[in-house]
């Protein structure tokens, strides 16, 4: 019999627009991108603004705090590289300081039900996978009443 091994996850492949984000993650920092011309926050990062079409992206360091706007729990891994991680709570987080315009998607650790996650205050952290720093979120306090 051969020993079972965990399947590899695909490595990150940052492009020119996302490279500053991933470089900051490797340093344990969170950067958000906004338009220097009109101030619109955006995710995913891109060169041109969707509102004013300016090619003036700027990167701003964020606190890493936010509020869970939505959540789903996966009980089945659709990629073998994630099989050991289920159940997995995936959250949409409205990042503080971005006027609810920048919403990141990530894992909530430890996983909880979608009902428990919805509205929760969270903080970002980073976990190493295949040598890459991947953002994850943890619940830090009470739910917002908004």
Image: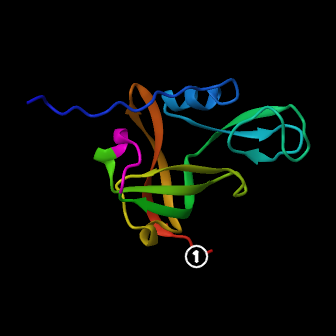
**What's the residue at 65%, 25% (across, down)?**
15
Q: How many marks?
A: 1
Whether 63 is drawn above or below 119: the answer is: above
**What's the residue at 81%, 47% (across, down)?**
40
The quarter of the picture where residue 58 lies is top right
Q: Quadrant of the C terminus?
A: bottom right
The quarter of the picture where residue 22 lies is top right
Q: Position of residue 90 (x, y in %)?
A: 47, 55
Whether 3 is drawn above or below 100: the answer is: above
Pointer 1 local density, CA inside 10 Å: few below 14, some 14–19, many at least 20: few
Q: Position of 126 compared to 57: left or right?
A: left
**Frontmost residue, 145 versus 111:** 111
Q: Residue beneath label 1, please? A: 145
Q: Position of residue 13 (x, y in %)?
A: 56, 25
Whether 112 is drawn above or below 4: the answer is: below
Residues shaded magenta? 76-82
Within the magenta stretch, is there residue 55? no
**What's the residue at 8%, 30% (across, down)?**
1
Whether 121 is drawn above or below 5: the answer is: below
């Amino acid at each position: 019999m051969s020993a079972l091994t965990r399947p590899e996850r695909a490595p990150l492949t940052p492009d020119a627009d996302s490279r500053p984000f991933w470089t900051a993650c490797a340093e344990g920092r969170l950067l958000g991108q906004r338009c220097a011309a009109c101030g619109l926050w955006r995710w995913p990062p891109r060169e041109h603004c969707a509102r004013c079409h300016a090619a003036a992206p700027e990167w701003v360091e964020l606190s890493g705090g936010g509020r869970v706007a939505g959540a789903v729990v996966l009980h089945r891994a659709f990629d073998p590289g994630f099989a050991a991680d289920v159940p997995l709570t995936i959250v949409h987080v409205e990042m503080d300081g971005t006027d609810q315009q920048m919403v990141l998607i990530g894992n909530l650790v430890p996983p909880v039900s979608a009902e428990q996650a919805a509205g929760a205050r969270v903080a970002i952290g980073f976990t190493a996978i295949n040598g890459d720093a991947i953002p994850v979120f943890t619940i830090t306090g009470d739910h917002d009443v908004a």
